[in-house]
Amino acid sequence: MDSLANLQPGQLIARGTARHLRQHDFICLEEFVPTSGLRVDLMAIGPKSEIWVVECKSSRADFMSDNKWQGYLEWCDRFFWSVPPDFPTELLPNDTGLIIADAYDAEIIRPAPEQKLAAARRRKMMLKFARNSADRLRSFVDPKPSRLYT
């Protein structure tokens, strides 16, 4: 059975987007929590420590129900929407980036404006990204670790 059959539409978009960003030397984590109460679909770290947030929207209804996206802006240098080819892109704010994606690849249609993070926030996000990545990787080796450290 194809593993893609088990993914939701937004996850398929995230997959293609992450694949594309990897071609630009960005490493992505899905479902990243920059701070309590926020969860971004993709956080991407670039080769020069750039931090991008990408929100994946599969439909008009999915976009219209998102009322937290502006809170993500303070946690990244650039903010993008990633949507499927048939998405009504006129709904998306013009001052954000736009990526068109499917499960296999993507294309950056409109670059996002840059709003550089403060050094302290960038350091905090880089450390959180690294720790989160290591923890996820560790869970493949030891899916039920003992909680020696809390």
Image (spheres, rainbow, N blue to C red):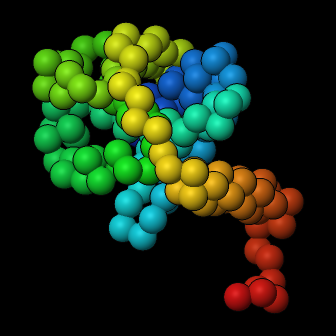
Q: Residue at x 78, y 87 (%)?
A: 149
Kindly give the residue lying farthest to the right in the view shown. Answer: 141
Which residue appears at 25% of the width and 14% of the height? 86
Judged left or right of residue 41, residue 24 is right
Tally of marks? 0
Which of these two is toward me, 11 or 42? 42
x then y, percent, for residue 36? 42, 70
Q: Would you say 113 lies left or right of 27 here?
A: left
Vertical arrangement, residue 22 with respect to residue 137, above or below: above
Expressed as whole percent of the image width and height from the top left, the position of residue 67 reads 19, 51
Is residue 123 visible in the rendered image? The answer is yes
Residue in front for this viewpoint, 115 or 34: 115
Q: Please report the residue visible at 81 percent of the width from the left and 89 percent of the height from the top.
A: 148
Residue 59 rendering spot, x and y as whole percentages: 22, 31
Pinpoint residue 72: horizontal percent, then vertical percent: 36, 49
Residue 63: quadrant of the picture: top left
Of all residues, the one furthest to the front in this rendering is: 119
The N terminus lies in quadrant: top right
The reply, left or right, for residue 120 in relation to residue 100 is right
The correct choice, above or below, for 39 with respect to 60 in the image is below
Q: Viewed as shown, does residue 70 lie left or right of 120?
A: left
Front-most of residues 112 and 134: 112
